[in-house]
Image: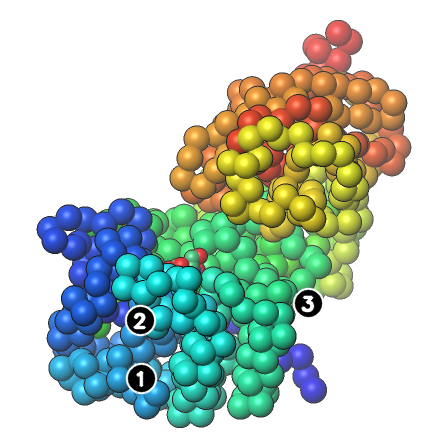
Amino acid sequence: MADKLQWWRDNRFGMFVHWGMYAATEGYWNGQETEGIGEWIQNREKIPLAEYRKLAAQMTLSEYDADEWVALAKRAGMGHIVITAKHHEGFAMYDSACSDYNIVQLGPSGRDPLAELSAACQRGGIRFCIYYSHCLDFAHPHAYGNAWDFDPEQIEMERYVEEKLKPQLRELLTNYGPVGLIWFDMPRGLSEAGTQDLRDLVHELQPNCIIGARLGYHLEDYHSLGDNELPCCVLREADWETPATLNDTWGYKRDDQNWKTPAELVESLAELAACDVNYLLNIGPTASGRIPDGSVQALEGLGEWMAVHRESVIGTQGSPFASHGDNWFATQRDDKLYLFQRDWQPQLSLRGLTNDVVKASLPGAPTVELGLRQADGCLHLQLPDAAPTPFTGVIELTLDGRPECAPLPVEQPDGCIYLTSQPDQVEPGSAPPGNAGAEAIATELAEDGRALEIHGGRACNWRRSDDKLCWQFDLETAGRFAVIVRTRGPKYGEWIGGEVLRATIGGQSLEAELQGEEAVNKPRTRYFPERGSSLGTLSLQPGKLTLELSALRFTDGADLSLCEIVLRRKPEDEQRA
Ligand code: FHN
């Protein structure tokens, strides 16, 4: 059977829709704006179910036009739509026979938004997909999340599974046509066998339905990065997706106007494609079914870029390079290599491509002649002073065959060697966790068993002094290099630092405390602050070299999270020091 994920990989880019009764609150309750993401308002404000269900009368759907949603998704370049059939609030946004707590029974319109969207997707030629919160349900006494109406001590998860979860999955996978994927979320309280049961039920009803992203017990068909988390490098060992918001909430909040710009969205989409990661970008419609203006503007802006550059992202595979430079990254398709520049420069030089370049051109400006020279393993491109289209600039290369690159990171013409992490570079230790403040973060991670791992290209759960990370790279010319370690802080928080790391290359070692003296500004740092810290300088001789990194001291309560290492050649005048 053809790989059922192939359509999903080829699509690369989808629309997420968070739509439920929370939209009717617009992010406010009793005149106060709720903190954080809007779809959690009932939980955050402890709204009694008897009160909350009255919101259904405001779900008028008077501005809901499913064909308009599909058209906007297509203009933005999205190939599928994942809509919340039931979020944590437990309110079904479709005609559910097993629970009258749904939009058709309680809403004033009597319309079934999922049926309308499924039909519109069929008409529009894009995949209809469903989000279902399978463990949290604020309207059921035997699911998680509502400890103000129900007694959490009384939860019997199997009753929830049999009374609501499985019947609703059956309805959704029977009554709404082909479902491209089902997006489970927040796994909790289910056994592995119970989770496998759900997987089997989905496959019994729709064998080709992809199971994402957070079913639990790693039984999903692809992995999910954290919300709004962008990877640090190409993720090669599995299929991955980043779910992201256009502002800072999934469900509608009338005063969250912190929209991402089209420029940031374009750069994120392109870099995710370069990292071989899908992008699931969210809209949060109002109670009437209108898509907020800020969302429409952002997606329309992105769509203008996609109208010219769709080929460089959709249907491509991740970068062939062992690592990228700070200002460039790449995608590939057959004999095409697409190079992206974050900030457009009139020259682009890079090392590591072993193909001959047959042709170089600018999508959107096919008549513009580009300067092209290949020498000493380097590719040099002479470009116009400005990119022909706004936002991330794209250069299309036609090669003498499929792209082939040096297998290990090499020194780039900017004098830097960029080292990023793959799971096989980890040597987990067994020493007791050295992070005295581990209890501060142990709620997230059970200390027992959680060892240093690479998640989304980032080293995390790093707590043991004998944990080790190793990189190999190729050096052609001897020299003195600064060793810069880029680490990130907690989401929405401040960068912390203070750890002491040791780097060893060829018998030479450096040790230093992370001071965070260098800023790192990429889309991945919007929610996760990241800084570079120098460990010192090493004199390196040419050859295939190995860098080993370990942590001698941790910062209490902080999670040492490594994104990238940069070996930066010292300027000539400092080479002799
Ligand atoms: O709690 C949910 C949240 O409301 C939203 O649905 C996101 C989307 O990825 N998932 C959970 C938080 O990660």
Determine the image quadrant of residue 506. top right
- Residue 500 drawn at (x, y percent): 66, 22
Colour scheme used in the picture? rainbow
Q: Quadrant of ligand 1?
A: bottom left
Residue ID for mark 2: 139
Q: CA distance from mark 1 to mark 2?
A: 10 Å
Q: Quadrant of the N terminus?
A: bottom right
Side of 522 where 95 appears, left or right: left
Residue displayed at 63% across by 75% down: 193
Residue displayed at 30% across by 87% down: 95
Identity of the amino acid at label 3? Asp
Residue ID for mark 3: 334
Instruction: State which tag comes first along the sequence, 1 or 2.
Output: 1
Furthest residue to the left?
Answer: 31
Residue ID for mark 1: 99
Kind of element beneath mark 1: loop
Identity of the amino acid at label 2? Ala
Q: Nearer the viewer, residue 152 or 101?
A: 152
Q: Nearer the viewer, residue 410 or 80?
A: 80
Instruction: State which tag comes first along the sequence, 2 or 3.
Output: 2
Identity of the amino acid at label 1? Ser
Q: CA distance from mark 2 to mark 3?
A: 50 Å
Residue 332 higher or lower than 469, as above or below: below
Side of 574 where 182 appears, left or right: left
Count of numbered labels shown in the rendering? 3
Side of 134 where 60 appears, left or right: left
Q: CA distance from mark 3 to mark 1?
A: 50 Å
